[in-house]
Every structure is written in structure tokens, then in C-alpha cells.
Image: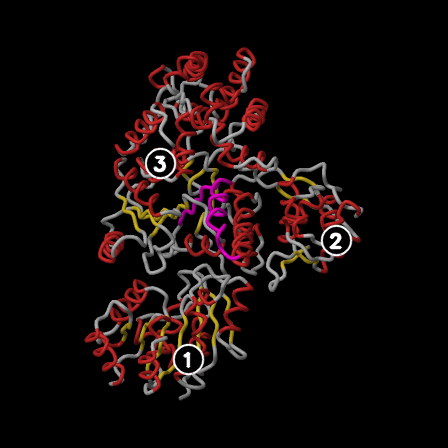
Amino acid sequence: MVFTDHDITSALKQYFGFESFKGDQKKIVRSVLEQKNTFVIMPTGGGKSLCYQLPAMMMEGTAIIISPLIALMKNQVDSIRGYSQEDNIASFLNSSLNKTQMTDVKSEIVSGKTKMLFIAPETLTKDENIEFFQKTNISFVAVDEAHCISEWGHDFRPEYRRIRTMISAIGEDIPIIALTATATPKVQTDIVKSLEMIDPNIFISSFNRDNLFYEIRPKVNKDNAIKSIIQFIKTSKGKSGIIYVQSRKSTEEIAKVLNVNGIIAAAYHAGLDAKTRTTVQDDFLMEEVEVIVATIAFGMGIDKPDVRFVIHFDIPKSIENYYQETGRGGRDGLKGDCLAFYSYKDILKLEKFLRDKPVAERELSAQLMDEVIAYAENNSCRRKFLLHYFGEEYDDGNCGNMCDNCKYPKKKQEVKDEMRLALKVVELLNENYTIKILVEFVTGKSSKEMKSQRLEPIFLCDKLELFGAGAGKDELFWHTIFRQAVLNDLLFKEIEQYGILKLTDGGKNFIKHPESLLIPLNRDFTVKDDGEYDFGGGQSAALDNILVEMLKDLRKSEARKLKVQPWVIFSEPSLQDMATYYPISMEDMLQISGVSQGKAQKFAKPFIELISKYVEENDIDRPTEVVVKQVANKSRNKVTIIQSIDRKMPFDDIARNVEMTHDELLYELNNIVDGGTKININYYIKDKVDDDIIEEIFDYFKGSNTDSIDTAIRKLHEEDIGEEEVLLTRIKFVSEIAN
């Protein structure tokens, strides 16, 4: 049957009540109606569902929609039934149905009443279902969330790789429409290849979500990040939001802290029973719950248009994850805020999870995480970075200050000569290596990894003319240069060899005829940024930058008097807190993060005097302290840990008693000593860390300008000192020297 433009527009009004299409919707619908293989890449909220729902209503037979989640199927079916007088117009087949219900669904399909059937790939693989569909008039097959097909997609499931085989088993010449909200060029290639979509019509909408504000903040520590989140949510009272975390345990912990601080929150993760998960989802949709604290398990099946903020407490594993998850904010077209906390410690945790994975999977995940690091540390327009990742060119002048880097731009630096050097290194090494290796080469670092891989000509790198030619700059600088080369189309990443950098024609020309190039340098997240933070581009944290500098100067002069490192007196986050809440008494000072009774007595007096004078001279109206109330278990844990240490208990036993992992206990102990509490772990550390290693780590901290754990782990890792050794020795150092 041939459908005219009038037929399509009339059907849109008849079935869905809309007068007109958005973007490429009409072209996509026509492609499906003409039974062409169709590939749709459209961001979340762009109207992907209508692209298969409308042709399914207009065509003879039943459309099969392959969907990854039961919750997503239910939402889609409920939505479609809401537009129709007949509930049987759309149904689903999945494990939530009993045999009787499955029989009823199949009867409705046979009768011709069901136009859309939602099914998981796992259900489609069953022989009895394949046999049933062979006898059914199938109009087309839609593959929703098609990125799940690709190993490069963030929700890889083996059954998705078998979709082509299953469709072929059902019948020949069944047209396919594949839809996804996120697909890099690599993923696009994988999808088309796997589904054997011959000469498909491809429709790619812009990935730009211009109503979303993107921001990255350094995660100094867990408590500091939670405090920032509470401050933000309280300025957005009544607004719905999602907080993504990596672990199930963290969802529960953070949700509890939010609730005791007057924010209605609920945890969501795959470990909850089906009834609880459904209840949490429904409460969120019905606005009984303001904030969901969730793992990645939450979101794909939730269609809530008015999510006003998406916070990543832990940095996600890939840019695809990040884009998908932030895309759940502002689906109604109104402003949404996307805030992510980043620390190098989170990356180390993710790397730990990969240790037992096959080599190929480890390498793949490492490349994906490398992109996330680049995004977080990047000082250029975040929107441009994201869109470039998905193969879309974007003029950062169009951002409209809707990311933190554009709103608070950093000073740019001339890098013409350095860029030419970077491109010449790529050329010299035959366009055959990743950023990591290229940075090590240009800085003259003969890493163990380089030598163990015996990479040629890298293995003989000290004999090559450009080896170490950029040693005058650090690795962070050269990472920035290579990233900017990609963003400025001087280099590109080979799709089939992910991470390998190759020269563009523009890059080859730049080597011959270099031109002025100004770029902002990447942020170093091992050092706390003193800049003003902004939630959502509108609500600024009340950080007094002038006072911060005055407090730093005072700390420096006090450090000289006492002959200690400045951070030993008060940490950077403590100074930040002082410059936000203006403590003018000893009682006030004890409310500041990281200030214990002991620290206050030893160091606080001159700081209180300075702040009091500053407040008076500038007629400052001091804010009411935002005290983050903790759940009772947290304080009990601290007491239990300290008492257990006093009793010289083994750390594994302590961790078990407070329901922590060994690593979590080490970080918690570091938090405790950072708060000014002395802890004697000599009984434990003597069997775990050699005396010469302890001495080396002590020397590092005595000479370091920062107490950052991330920085210490990163720097000392180069000396073959492990993370546990650093964490244990830092506890000993801070207890003995700082407290």
C-alpha cells in the first residue's frame, strides 16, 4: 500500500493527537512504511518511539519491538494504550507473565487486534515463540536501544547479537528499524553490520541537548560531595532529580543521609525485589519521592519529563553511559542541570573491577574510561567535546554558557609549537599508537608497559629524535595537546582500532605550515580548584574567594612559624568551608569540615581572629550553617573503628564488623584522621609496609604542597608503591605529624 503525505499526517492526528512532526520523524515514518531498513539515531526526548509506533498503527500485521527492560516495555505499552480505546492495541511478552497471560497475548495477535508487541531478545530466542511468529503477519521489527548490540555500547547483552538470526528464522525480507539515543561512529558501524541492514536509510539527529547545563566538580572526599549535593538540592526544593552511584551500598547510604536532612529520597538498585523497585519507580513518577539515588539499573525504563537535575556521585564508566544518564534530565525541554563529581580515585576503583576480566575487555574498558577522564579534565566547551565524541561537529560559540567551562572560561595558552611537535610524533611513530603511549614518548618516559609490550619502534625509542622532546612539560599538558588536536580535527581516532590516533589532512598541513593556536589547558583534579562553583549555572555556592586567599596567606605564615606543611594546619576543603560559613568562635570552627577539637585548639585562634575582623570590616551577613546530619550508623561506625584500633584488631575483622570492604575502611580511616583524630596503627602497619617504604612516603608528604590522596597514589605509583601502602602510611603520617 502506498501512503501519501496526507495519509501520514492524518494518521498522526488520528492516533496521537499531534498536528505536526518533529525533526525527521515524518521522513523516518515514511521510510518504515515503504518497508526500507531504517537506522535512527536520536537523542533522548527527541521522539524516537513515534517513529515506529505510527507506522505500526498504519500497516497490516503486528510489529515486533525488541526492548531491553521489562519496565521500559510496560511504560511503552501503557503510553500507547493511553492514546487508544483498545487496550489490546499493544502488549508485551516477557518473564513477568504467566502461561495463561502469554496465551491470551498470542490470541490477541492472531486475531489481528495487536499492532505492537514488545519483547525482550531473551524471550524472542525461545523456539516456541519463533514458531509462533513464523505463522504471524509481522509488519516489521523495531530494535529499541540498539546500542546494546555493540560491544562498545554500554549495555552489551549477548542475545542482542542474535537478533539478525532470529529475524531470519521468522521470515525473509522483514524490514528492520533500529533506534538508539547514543551511538559513536564505531557503534553505528557495529549495529548496521550485526543486523545485516543492507543499504539502510540512516537518520541522525543532533545530539545536542541545549537545555542541559553540564558541570564537573572535584570530589575531595565522600562527605564533602554529599554536603555539596545537599546544598544544591535545598536550593532546588521540590524539584525531581536522580543521583547515580556505582555501588548498591552507596545508594542506600546516600538515600538515608538525604532523608535525615529533610530531602525525600529513595534508593534503587538491581538487588531490590521487583515489588520494591516498582514501588520506588511509581513513587518517583507520582512525586511522592523527590530524589532517586540509583545505580545504572535505573532510568532506561522511566519516562519522567520534568527531571530537573542528574547528579553523578561517581564518574560513569563511559561517555555513552554519561550521555544516556544525563539525557534523563529536562526531557520536557526546560532547563536541566547535570553535575558530576570526579576524582582519580574513582578511576582506580573502576580499574580494580577489571583486573580479572579478559584482556580484550580490559583494554576496551580502559579506552572508554580514558575518554571519561578526558571529558572531566577538559577545560574546553563540554558540549563540543560530547558532540565530537558522537561524530557531530559543533561551534562552541553556540553553547550559550550552558557548561561550566564556557560560563567560567579559563585563560588560553599559545601552543603552536607544542601542537606541531605532537603531530610530528604521531607521524614519526607511523600513526599507530594511543594517546597514553604518545604522551609517554614525547615526555621521554620509558614505562614498564611500553617495554613489556615491546612496541616497535617504541622499544628503541631512546634512539629516535623526538623521544623526550616535550619533557619540559608534564603529562597533563601533553594529554591536553593531543585531545585538542582531535577536537580541532588535526588528528582522528581510527574506528576499527579504537584509540589509535591518525593525522587528518589538516594535521599534515599544520606540520608544514603551523598557525597560531590558543587552547585552555586541562584541569588538574588532584588539586582542589579555588574557583567559584556554580550549580546549574544559576545558583552559586557562597564561596568568598578573597577570604580564601587571605586564609591561605595566614596558613602559610603559620606553617613557617611551626615548621610544617601548610596543609598540616588546615586542609584546602577546610579553608573553603571557612570562606563559606565565616566561623567567628571556637564553637563555629568545630562545625567546619576537617576541624577537630584538637586541631581547633592548636591552630584555630588566628584564623578566627582574621575571619571576625573580615566579617566586621565588610559588614558580612553570615549564613546559617548547613550542618549535614548523619545517620546514626555512620557515627557508630566511627566510634567502633577507633575502639577496634585501640584494641589492635585485624583490619579485615574491623571492616567486617562495620560492613565495609578493606579498601573502604582504609579510606574511612583517612577521613577520620583528616578530621583531626589521632589513630595509632603501628601494630598493623609494621607487617604490611616496609620501613624504607614508610620513610619514602613520609618524605613525600613532608615535601608535598597538598595532602591529596589521589595525587599521592598517582605520584608514588610511579615508584612502584601500591595504593594500600600509601593509604596506610598516610594515616600514620597525618596522625603523628598533622594531629
Q: Quadrant of the N terminus?
A: bottom left
Q: Is residue 719 left or right of residue 198?
A: right
Q: Are marks 3 and 2 in contact (CB under 8 Å)?
A: no
**Counting residues from the N terminus, which is met first, the one under dot 3 or under dot 2?**
2
Q: Which mark is residue 707?
A: none
Instruction: Determine whether the residue tagged by mark 3 lies in a helix, strand or loop.
Output: helix
**Residue toward you, 380 or 456:** 456
Residue 26 in the image: state x and y as whole percent: 43, 74
The stretch drawn in magenta includes residue 355: yes
Residue 293 in the image: state x and y as whole percent: 33, 47
**Residue toward you, 282 or 167:** 167
Magenta segment: 336-358
Instruction: Determine whether the residue tagged by mark 2 lies in a helix, strand or loop.
Output: loop
Residue occupying image coordinates x 30% and y 62%: 71
Q: Which residue is mark 1?
A: 167
Tell me: residue 193, above or below residue 267.
below
Tell me: residue 145, above or below residue 440.
below
- Label 3 sits on what residue type? Ala
Residue at the left extreme of this rendering: 100
Residue 617 in the image: state x and y as whole percent: 44, 15
Label 1 environment density (alpha carbons within 10 Å; few <14, some 14–19, many ≥20): many
Label 2 environment density (alpha carbons within 10 Å; few <14, some 14–19, many ≥20): few
Query: Alpha-carbon distance for marks 2 and 1?
Result: 48 Å
- Label 2 sits on what residue type? Pro
* Total marks placed: 3
Q: Which mark is residue 457?
A: 2
Tell me: residue 511, above or below residue 124.
above
Query: Alpha-carbon distance for marks 3 and 1?
Result: 51 Å
